[in-house]
Image (cartoon, helix red, strand yellow):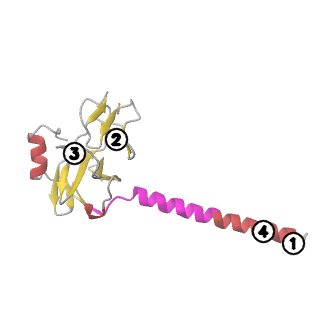
Amino acid sequence: MAVEKERRSFLGAALGLFTAAGGVGALTAMKYTWDPLPSVKAAGFTTIDLSGAQENVLVTEKWRGKPIFVLKHSKDMKSNPRDIKIGDNTYFVAVGLCTHLGCIPAYMSDLHEFHCACHGGQFDASGEVLKTPPPRPLDIPPFKIDGTKLVLGEEGPEYKKLLADGLTSKV
Ligand code: FES
């Protein structure tokens, strides 16, 4: 009887340990997924250091209360004049709000597309509309390139050119 009780408490402890380890693993994975790249926020500006960005992994930051998507393109993605070149790498940056009614689209990394669950809108990895109802591509926030950093909220020459070429609306 005592042996059975000991066995049960051993199994209980082992199960508890196993569950706790799984929980820690899940939390670590969640933190890794949700942690943005190193960034600094000050007076309406958000500076993101892109040196640690991984290809085809969407980073979501916050700028003036809006979600901002930053996506480092992989070599197999189509290039688009809306993309940003930083060194040898290509990035897409956008306000992460669907241009239909403002839902936050999800990035489907296997398809290289953003899908909006609200009314089925779809965008490619450069924010171009693949499927309506969104009336226009994802908006690009004002940005300035500073070495490997992206400063959101400042209008650098690359952003001004996108505006002048009619490739984004002002947000
Ligand atoms: Fe995205 Fe309607 S809000 S499709």
In the rendered image, the vertical position of residue 156 relative to residue 164, given as above or below? below
Give whichever of discs 4 and 1 has the lower sequence position: 1
In the rendered image, the vertical position of residue 7 relative to residue 135, given as above or below? below
According to the picture, the residue beneath numbered tag 3 turns out to be 79
Residue 24 position by quadrant: bottom right
Whether the residues at callouts 1 and 2 have beta carbons within 8 Å, the answer is no
Answer whether residue 94 is magenta in the image: no
Q: Amino acid at mark 1?
A: Val
Nearest the viewer among 13 and 50 is: 50
Magenta residues span: 19-40
Residue 12 position by quadrant: bottom right
Question: What's the residue at 47%, 57% (across, down)?
Answer: 30
**Between tags 2 and 4, which lies in front?**
2
Q: Secondary structure at mark 2?
A: strand
Horizontally, residue 5 falls left or right of residue 28, namely right
Question: What's the residue at 16%, 43% (across, down)?
Answer: 81
Residue 40: x and y, percent? 26, 62
Horizontally, residue 45 falls left or right of residue 104, namely left
Rate crowding at label 2 as few (under 14), some (14 to 19) or many (20 or more) other CA atoms within 10 Å: many
According to the picture, the residue beneath numbered tag 1 turns out to be 3
Residue 97 position by quadrant: top left
**Which numbered disc covers residue 113?**
2
Q: CA distance from mark 1 to mark 2?
A: 58 Å
Give whichever of discs 2 and 4 has the lower sequence position: 4
Rate crowding at label 4 as few (under 14), some (14 to 19) or many (20 or more) other CA atoms within 10 Å: few
Q: Amino acid at mark 4?
A: Ser
